[in-house]
Image: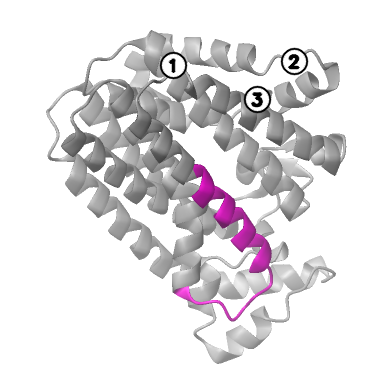
Amino acid sequence: MKLNRMYSFLNSDLEKIENELQLTIKSEHSLLQEASLHTLQAGGKRLRPVFVLLAGKFGQYELSTIKNVAVALELIHMASLVHDDVIDDADVRRGQPTIKAKWDNKIAMYTGDYIFARSLELMTNIENPEAHKILAHTIVEVSLGEIEQIRDKYNFDQNFKTYFRRIKRKTALLIAASCQLGAIASDVPKHLHEKLYLFGYYVGMAFQITDDILDFVATEEQLGKPAGSDLIQGNITLPVLLAMRDSELKELITSVNEGMDPKEIVQIIEAIKASGSIELSIEYSDWYLKKALSVIKEFPSGKAKLALTNIAKFIGKRKF
């Protein structure tokens, strides 16, 4: 089953969210608007808005209120990607030129800042102080994750704890916040919105680990960027850390550098794939998915619970 069919009952609301995204990033400055629209129109799964809306279904769901959270969380995600592309010196995302490639780093940074500011402006429509505390904490953690990624580039001596903390900050916490803030906006009781946060966290960890696996095993067409891009850019992911437990393979992997011959990179990627580290990484992802499914199992039956369950399963079983 395709991902979007799992929550097709949200289609009408998601169309309105898409329209709101376009309206929100409008700017009097033509270049800023063009760059922002370029990012928006590059596509994406819009998973964060989906999590916001589904979580809201466990409470008093009002699209006029919850749409502010859904749009804000997607904009924060978009802004972080724009900044990431500058950090990673990435020219392509989802098969399209990045803002920094189409314009330059300065335009990319200001565009990311603008999108981010618009998200905060939207969140002022939510009156619950707890929602703003959660969002502020999440933004701080996401920022720390971006800084850690810069710090740890080509750092082959980092440990597993560093990796898991980084993907928690870069990916899992924003998904967790999407679930919790969607619930809060719909007045879901505290004990339930805290469980939805946990569900989102576990799903987010599995999502990022799966992304890190796909970076090695998916095709360039599927990824929208060259396979092995993370390693080429110096981002040390779980398959690499697991592969480096073999001393000979570690020596080979640690030779990776920015100016390396692409043919040598291909050989290293194939060695990592043959090491068994991909299969072990899948086991880590499965562990987080089982934790997510055990949390959502406690929720009342209905379309929202079924959709969240199916999405979690889909995330862990994307094409390997």
Which amino acid does the dot numbered 3 rest on?
Answer: Leu
Does dot 3 land on a helix, a strand or a loop? Answer: helix
Q: Which residue is mark 3?
A: 40
Does dot 2 land on a helix, a strand or a loop? Answer: loop
The CA span between labels 2 and 1 is 20 Å
Q: Give x and y (percent) for residue 138.
A: 46, 44
Residue at (19% x, 45% y) in the render: 295
User: Which region is colored magenta?
Assistant: 139-160
Residue at (64% x, 41% y) in the render: 81
Can the viewer see residue 67? yes
Q: Which residue is mark 1?
A: 67
Q: Would residue 194 appear left or right of 252 to someone viewing this image?
A: left
Can the viewer see residue 99? no
- Is label 2 in contact with label 3 (beta carbons under 8 Å)? no
Let me know if residue 313 is in the magenta part: no
Which amino acid does the dot numbered 1 rest on?
Answer: Lys
Q: What is the magenta segment's predominant secondary structure?
A: helix
- The furthest residue to the bottom: 247
Let me know if residue 140 is in the magenta part: yes
The quadrant in which residue 120 appears is: top right
Q: Which residue is mark 2?
A: 27
